[in-house]
Image (spheres, helix red, strand yellow):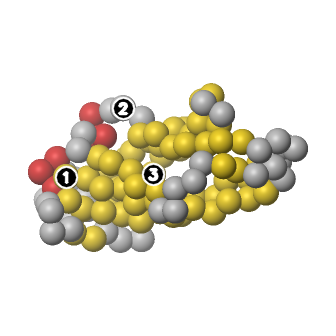
Amino acid sequence: MGFSETTDGRVSNIFNLSLVNKTFEDKNYYLKLAPSNQSKGVSILIIQEDSLLNSNSEKKKVFIIYKDKKTINQNETPLDIEVYIDDKYLKIFQLKFLAPST
């Protein structure tokens, strides 16, 4: 995993996500960046954004996290992402955002 620098002054990382619905009902989901000091200047873009997770199925998604260069002060920044199913908090996972050395 690496990073890319954009022309508009941001750094981006690409991540893969796998969601599994083991129930017999379709579920809606979304991701949300957990608020923290590290999340300043950060945004999430989910590729092919649809929010439906069909019953008894797995969905693989790609998402991109962007961070403003001016808010980067280290080359690895931990970020917490919250997962919500049917508007109810499910869990939080942590990832590392990579950036150029400061």
Note whether 41 is above or below 68 in the view shown: above
User: Which quadrant would the N terminus be assigned to in this image?
Assistant: bottom left
Whether residue 58 is visible: yes
Provide residue 44's location: percent of width, then percent of height.
38, 51
State the image coordinates of residue 78 (x, y, percent, origin top left): 37, 47
Cα gap from disc 3 to disc 2, whole angstroms: 14 Å
Q: Inspect the image, locate mark 1, and give the three-letter code of the amino acid beneath it.
A: Asp
Which amino acid type is shown beneath numbered disc 2? Pro
Tag 1–tag 2 contact (CB < 8 Å): no
Q: Name the residue under label 1.
A: 68
Q: Residue 60 carries which label?
A: none
Residue at the spot of label 2: 35
Q: For this view, does 50 lie left or right of residue 100?
A: right
In the image, residue 46 above or below residue 82 = below
Badge nearest the viewer, 3 or 2:
2
Dot 1 or dot 2: first in sequence order is 2
Q: Is residue 31 left or right of residue 6?
A: right
- Residue 91 visible to an observer of this rendering: no
The disc label shown at residue 95, or none: 3
Query: Which of the two discs, 3 and 1, sits closer to the camera?
Result: 1
Q: How crowded is mark 3: few (under 14 residues within 10 Å), some or many (20 or more)?
A: few
Q: In this view, does 87 lie to the left or right of 102?
A: right
Residue under the image location 60 percent in, 48 percent down: 51
